Image (spheres, rainbow, N blue to C red):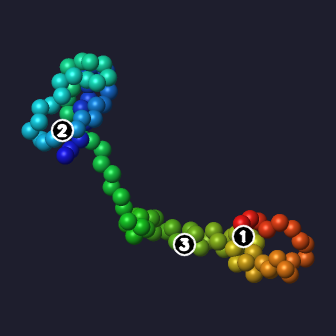
Amino acid sequence: MPIYEYRCEGCGGVNSVYLRSYTSADPTECKLCGADSLYRIISRVAYIRSEMDKLEQLDPKYHKMVDEAIGRAPANSDPDYHMDRMVPFSQAKEKGEPYFKE
């Protein structure tokens, strides 16, 4: 049960029309301006790529660039730097509100 799209030559608007079958009669009147000059257009389609396809399309130098950027980053930008310094609230030097409230 396809939905076809038609463009109006008068106003340039796009009309989406549900037709029960391919042999159904085409619409004759624009829903936007009322003109009778519609022609069928090819609808846009979506193509969803997998994560693997996206990775294959990356620049071959991408991983090298990331490694170089990480090498130039300051030491405290590494998440492990902060994780190693975390302590339970009971052992904290200063008491305060936890960041994540329940």
Q: Which of marks 1 and 2 is nearer the N terminus?
A: 2
55 to the left or right of 83: left
Front of the two marks 3 and 2: 2
* Residue type, numbered disc 2: Leu
Front of the two marks 1 and 2: 2
Q: Residue at x 79, y 68 (%)?
A: 98
Residue of label 1: 77
Q: How many marks?
A: 3
Secondary structure state at the residue bearing disc 1 = helix
Badges 3 and 1: C-beta atoms under 8 Å apart?
A: no
The 10 Å Cα crowd at callout 3, few under 14, some 14 to 19, many 20 or more, is: few
* Residue type, numbered disc 3: Lys
The 10 Å Cα crowd at callout 2, few under 14, some 14 to 19, many 20 or more, is: some
| Label 3 to label 2: alpha-carbon separation | 52 Å
Residue of label 3: 64
Q: Residue at x 51, y 67 (%)?
A: 62
The image shows residue 75 at horizontal and vertical percentages of 75, 74
Secondary structure state at the residue bearing disc 3 = helix
Viewer-proximal residue, 27 or 62? 27
Q: Residue at x 56, y 68 (%)?
A: 65
The image shows residue 102 at horizontal and vertical percentages of 71, 66
| Label 3 to label 1: alpha-carbon separation | 19 Å
| Label 1 to label 2: alpha-carbon separation | 57 Å
Q: Which of marks 3 and 2 is nearer the N terminus?
A: 2
Based on the displayed image, in which of its 4 quarters is residue 52 positioned? bottom left
Residue of label 2: 19
